Image: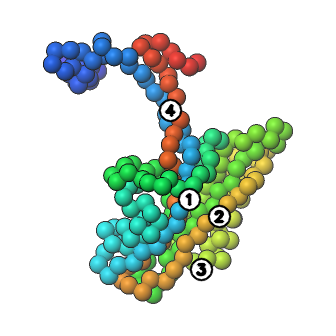
């Protein structure tokens, strides 16, 4: 059986419940790529004599107030619609939290420094927001040197493909840096997305958006 036929058979069984085909009973929507929207910023640090992932990293997440979530990390682009908000009063235990995150882990006596810088691309003629560029730092530099490197990284990113049409404005920078006293230490800085736009591409076989 061809691969496409196998996939169709699996999909048909998945949508069949007690003899009813859910594809026939429900309106089926095809959605496009989700677009991250509102985000909050948080930082944290943690240290442990036992381990990293279930130790210093988890405690850094706890310090940042996001340890109850399942963390997914993005690369370094902000859509134009992204907007900084206050941290929600409650995050559901076990929920998925999608982030742009800098993480630095070190050992006792060696500095852990994590930092994030971002800025917004604004059209030179229109002034409209095109989107944002983000750079992360994960290492052991002291705070001042890490900040310098982050600013240089953002300028380099901007200089390669954006200077002609956009200016870079409204930059923001956050750094967490400390010297662990225990065996392992982790510092984190994170942009955490709390919602998304979901483009509707098709509905019941009809194209929703051109």
* Real-space CA distance between mark 3 and mark 4, rounded to the nearest whole angstrom: 40 Å
Secondary structure state at the residue bearing disc 2: strand
Secondary structure state at the residue bearing disc 4: loop
Q: Tell me where residue 131 sits by quadrant.
A: top right
Name the outermost residue toward the front: 89
Q: Where is residue 47 in the image (x, y as percent from the top left)?
A: 39, 78
State which tag comes first along the sequence, 1 or 4: 1
* Foreground residue among 70 and 142: 70
| Relative to 62, 131 lies left or right | right
* Real-space CA distance between mark 2 and mark 4, rounded to the nearest whole angstrom: 29 Å
State which tag comes first along the sequence, 3 or 4: 3
List the residue tagged with mark 4: 198
Does the image show residue 119?
A: yes
* Real-space CA distance between mark 1 and mark 3, rounded to the nearest whole angstrom: 21 Å
In this rendering, which labeled residue sits more in front, label 2 or label 3? 2
Count how many numbered circles sit on residues in the image.
4
Secondary structure state at the residue bearing disc 1: strand
In the picture, the disc for residue 173 is 2
Q: Residues within 10 Å of mark 3 (few under 14, many from 20)?
A: some
Q: Where is residue 177 in the image (x, y as percent from the top left)?
A: 54, 76
In which quadrant will I find the N terminus?
Answer: top left
Q: Tell me where residue 148 sits by quadrant.
A: bottom right
List the residue tagged with mark 1: 41
Residue at (50%, 15%) from the top-left corner? 207
Secondary structure state at the residue bearing disc 3: loop
| Relative to 91, 143 lies left or right | right
**Scheme by which the image is coloured:** rainbow
List the residue tagged with mark 3: 142
């Amino acid at each position: 059986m061809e691969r496409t036929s196998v996939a169709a058979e699996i999909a048909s069984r998945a949508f069949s419940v007690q003899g009813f085909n859910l594809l026939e009973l429900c309106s089926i929507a095809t959605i496009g790529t989700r677009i991250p929207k509102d985000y909050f910023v948080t930082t944290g640090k943690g240290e442990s004599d036992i381990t990293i992932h279930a130790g210093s990293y988890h405690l850094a997440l706890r310090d940042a107030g996001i340890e109850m979530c399942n963390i997914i990390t993005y690369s370094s682009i902000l859509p134009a619609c992204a907007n900084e908000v206050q941290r929600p009063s409650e995050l559901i235990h076990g929920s998925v939290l999608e982030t742009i995150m800098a993480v630095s882990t070190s050992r006792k006596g060696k500095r852990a420094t994590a930092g994030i810088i971002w800025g917004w691309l604004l059209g030179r003629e229109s002034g409209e927001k095109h989107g944002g560029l983000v750079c992360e730092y994960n290492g052991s530099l002291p705070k001042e040197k890490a900040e310098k490197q982050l600013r240089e990284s953002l300028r380099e990113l901007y200089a390669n493909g954006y200077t002609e049409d956009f200016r870079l404005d409204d930059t923001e920078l956050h750094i967490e840096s400390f010297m662990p006293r225990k065996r392992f230490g982790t510092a984190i800085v994170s942009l955490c997305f709390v919602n998304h736009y979901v483009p509707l591409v098709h509905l019941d076989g009809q194209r929703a958006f051109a």
